[in-house]
Image (tube, helix red, strand yellow):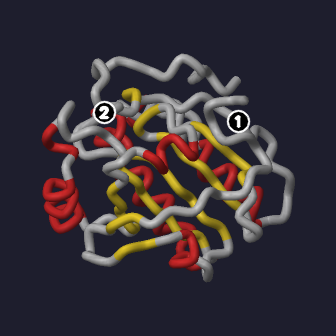
Amino acid sequence: MAFTLPLGSTAPDFQLPSTDGKTCSLASFAEARILVIFFTCNHCPYVIGSDEVTRATAEKFADRGVRFVAINSNSSNTYAEDDYAHMVTRMMEMKFPWTYLRDKSQEVALAYGALRTPHFYVFDQDRKLVYSGRSVDNPRDVSKMTINDLERVLDEVISGKPVTVPLTNPIGCNVKWEGKDKHWMPADACDLV
């Protein structure tokens, strides 16, 4: 079985604490026409480099029923700045237009097969996976970006068109797994394309 959730799969449920003090599950976002779940963190240069592009995309599609949910699964023993307290501070400072959840156990990252930060998953109205991979082709330095895969996918899904490129390789730092070297990847984790 592939490490990363295959296309067409139903979104795995979760019960995770949010930076606003609530506990969220998949049902918390039931009103969303399209749900973008992405694995992220506080410290990764690829995340930090592309956060404002992700913000612009989230804002652009908000009135079309698209909701963004960010999940931080990184071990805070590997990077202390990825702990819950730093997540709360980051959201207060940055005021991102998404819900930011903490997956301390890393069970949700395993259920989705998150490979990198950031790694984006787009689910349609039935919560079937229609896209997995990167948001843009140069997340660390968006001044060199030439492709915005996430915007393309959202435009296609909203328009009722098939997703032309449903899989790309996420670009970023690997998820920081508890008790492992910071560069460790599960043996069955591999490129998506």
Secondary element at image label 2: loop
Which label sits on residue 178? 2
Query: Residue at label 1?
Result: 167
Residue at image location 40% in from the left, 27% down from the top: 174
Which of the 4 image quadrants contains residue 92?
bottom left
Which amino acid type is shown beneath numbered disc 2? Answer: Glu
Which label sits on residue 85? none
Q: Position of residue 10 (x, y in %)?
A: 72, 57
Quadrant of the drawing holding the N terminus: top right
Q: Position of residue 14 (x, y in %)?
A: 50, 62
Q: Position of residue 91 (x, y in %)?
A: 23, 63
Q: Are marks 2 and 1 in contact (CB under 8 Å)?
A: no
Which amino acid type is shown beneath numbered disc 1? Answer: Leu
| Depth check, front residue: 61 or 121 | 121
Q: Earlier in the sequence, mark 2 or mark 1?
A: 1
| Depth check, front residue: 79 or 135 | 79
Left or right of 132 in this view: 98: left
